[in-house]
Image (tube, helix red, strand yellow):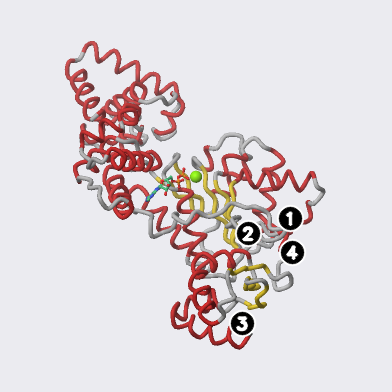
């Protein structure tokens, strides 16, 4: 295949992929020639190469073989001198360690499934989703950093990958780096060991968008924190976007330096709340569609989805695991997915999640029950109308979750653990004396467990 032929082929590609994709993905390719059946292209970044290979590889190969049958495979390699960055070797760039280019440091690959398209939005995550979307537009930096936090399995990593994918598609000119805090530390330690701190600093300071997942990992790791702080400041000074995730709010991460906490709080801090019933149902429905395509013979009742949304914990990962298991099981035994099969197949998951009730759920149910606002239950007012329901909720949290008194106190507007202890004792006493309280508790417990 000659350069002219490649030029013609590009015109064909323009027609098939559209001008936007063409501009972003095909135009930057430089055709280097064919050797031993392998057509080689130079690409400016390994990300671009991987993206093209994954999304347009088949199409390009198909059209190439139509013109020159000798072509068997495509190869994308990072051009050594086309980047403006220090060296390609030092680039920790995001993804696709699947086909590592020479000297390319293995970095966190992005999961194909974690895009905005597959992210189901509901009340508990709508703010986080909106903020992520905004940052993913790649426009002027408005909040820096974006700090996403929430419990395990609520979609933090999913949203971060979605941002990275979208940024790469919209702004292929930006050097987007996604990695976990653990990988950051690993890189840092490696650089120290190999006496390559200059490279390390240069590498991270040449990034346009830095995404660090699970920042709580560096808590208590002093020199990593120190380096993270400098990297962070250097990037903020250059007005580069930073996106961080953590398992709790910046101020609540223990053993994290105060100056880092306050830096992290400077931008926009949004949390992913535990999923509610509607969101779980939405997620289950979208998963059911995906599985439905994979197992066209299996039918799943809406009733089963509703049952699962009711009965399985707030962690989306657990929901997904349950669905996977259900479909696999049903296809093995050749049965439709009925409620009965579901209860059989997921007995252990259902049992385990029976006890997994969140503090938030308890607060919500209790405030509903007593007809007060959730904010009043958590807020500072001490009037009896709010104080009693608050104590009931504290009591139920102690009884029905495995959270400690200080943790419970934090969820009640940052109250001290002694306040929680006092509340729990008070309800214990009342329960023995006051029939109404005993009845309320029983009713609440039953609705919470259902
Ligand atoms: P975290 O990083 O917060 O622990 P993840 O982002 O890894 O959680 O999410 C766990 C799993 O749940 C992933 O497979 C993810 O795709 C899925 N998930 C979480 N939230 C959603 C959502 N809103 N819509 C669809 N899938 C979700
Ligand atoms: Mg995660």
Q: Element at badge 3?
A: loop
Q: CA distance from mark 4 to mark 2?
A: 12 Å
Q: Residue at 31% of width from left, 52% of height from top? A: 286
Expressed as whole percent of the image width and height from the top left, the position of residue 166 reads: 48, 64
For the view shown, which residue lies furthest in the right direction? 195
Of labels 2 and 1, earlier in sequence is 2
Residue 348 shows in this picture: yes
Number of marks drawn: 4
Q: Would you name the residue on which mark 3 appears? A: 1
Q: Would you name the residue on which mark 4 appears? A: 87
Q: Are marks 2 and 3 in contact (CB under 8 Å)?
A: no
Of labels 2 and 3, earlier in sequence is 3
Q: CA distance from mark 1 to mark 4?
A: 13 Å
In this rendered view, identify the residue nearer to me: 209 or 59.
Answer: 59
Of labels 3 and 1, earlier in sequence is 3
Q: Residue at 57% of width from left, 40% of height from top? A: 216
Q: Element at badge 4?
A: loop
448 to 323, vertically: above or below: above
Expressed as whole percent of the image width and height from the top left, the position of residue 134 reads: 45, 63
Depth check, mark 3 against mark 1: the one in front is 3
In this rendered view, identify the residue nearer to me: 407 or 56.
Answer: 56
Q: Are marks 3 and 4 in contact (CB under 8 Å)?
A: no
Is 373 on the left-hand or right-hand side of 201? Answer: left
Q: Would you name the residue on which mark 2 appears? A: 93
Q: CA distance from mark 2 to mark 3?
A: 31 Å
Neighbours of disc 1 within 10 Å: few (<14), some (14-19), many (20+): some
Depth check, mark 2 against mark 3: the one in front is 3
For the view shown, which residue lies furthest in the front direction? 70
Q: Would you name the residue on which mark 1 appears? A: 201
């Amino acid at each position: 295949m000659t350069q002219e032929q490649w030029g013609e082929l590009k015109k064909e590609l323009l027609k098939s992929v559209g001008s936007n994709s063409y501009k972003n993905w095909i135009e930057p390719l430089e055709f280097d020639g064919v050797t031993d059946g392998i057509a080689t292209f130079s690409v400016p970044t390994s990300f671009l190469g991987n993206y093209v290979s994954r999304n347009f590889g088949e199409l390009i190969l198909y059209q190439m073989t139509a013109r020159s049958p000798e072509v068997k495979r495509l190869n994308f390699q990072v051009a050594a001198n086309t980047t403006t960055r220090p060296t390609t070797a030092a680039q920790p760039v995001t993804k696709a360690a699947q086909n590592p280019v020479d000297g390319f440091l293995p970095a966190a690959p992005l999961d194909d499934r974690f895009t905005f398209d597959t992210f189901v939005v509901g009340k508990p995550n709508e703010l986080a989703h909106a903020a992520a979307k905004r940052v993913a537009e790649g426009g002027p930096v408005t909040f820096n950093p974006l700090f996403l936090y929430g419990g395990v399995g609520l979609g933090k990593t999913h949203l971060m990958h979605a941002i990275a994918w979208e940024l790469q598609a919209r702004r292929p000119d930006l050097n987007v780096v996604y990695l976990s805090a653990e990988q950051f530390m690993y890189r840092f330690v490696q650089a120290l060991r190999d006496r390559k701190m200059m490279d390390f600093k240069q590498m991270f300071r040449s990034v346009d968008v830095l995404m660090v997942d699970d920042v709580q990992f560096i808590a208590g790791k002093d020199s990593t924190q120190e380096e993270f702080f400098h990297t962070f400041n250097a990037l903020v000074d250059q007005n580069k976007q930073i996106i961080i995730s953590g398992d709790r709010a910046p101020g609540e991460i223990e053993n994290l330096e105060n100056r880092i906490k306050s830096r992290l709080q400077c931008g926009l801090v949004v949390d992913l709340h535990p999923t509610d019933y509607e969101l779980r149902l939405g997620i289950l429905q979208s998963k059911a569609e995906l599985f439905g395509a994979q197992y066209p013979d299996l039918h799943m009742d809406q009733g089963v989805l509703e049952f699962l949304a009711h009965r399985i914990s707030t962690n989306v990962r657990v929901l997904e695991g349950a669905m996977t298991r259900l479909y696999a099981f049903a296809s093995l035994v050749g049965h439709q997915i009925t409620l009965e099969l579901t209860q059989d197949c997921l007995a252990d998951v259902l049992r385990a999640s029976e006890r997994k009730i969140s503090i938030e759920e308890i607060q919500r149910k209790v405030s509903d029950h007593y007809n007060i606002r959730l904010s009043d239950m958590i807020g500072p007012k001490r009037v009896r109308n709010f104080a009693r329901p608050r104590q009931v909720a504290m009591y139920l949290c102690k009884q029905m979750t495995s959270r400690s008194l200080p943790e419970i106190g934090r969820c009640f507007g940052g109250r001290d653990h002694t306040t929680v202890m006092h509340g729990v004792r008070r309800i214990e006493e009342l329960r023995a004396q006051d029939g109404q309280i005993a009845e309320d508790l029983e009713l609440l417990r039953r609705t919470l467990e259902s």
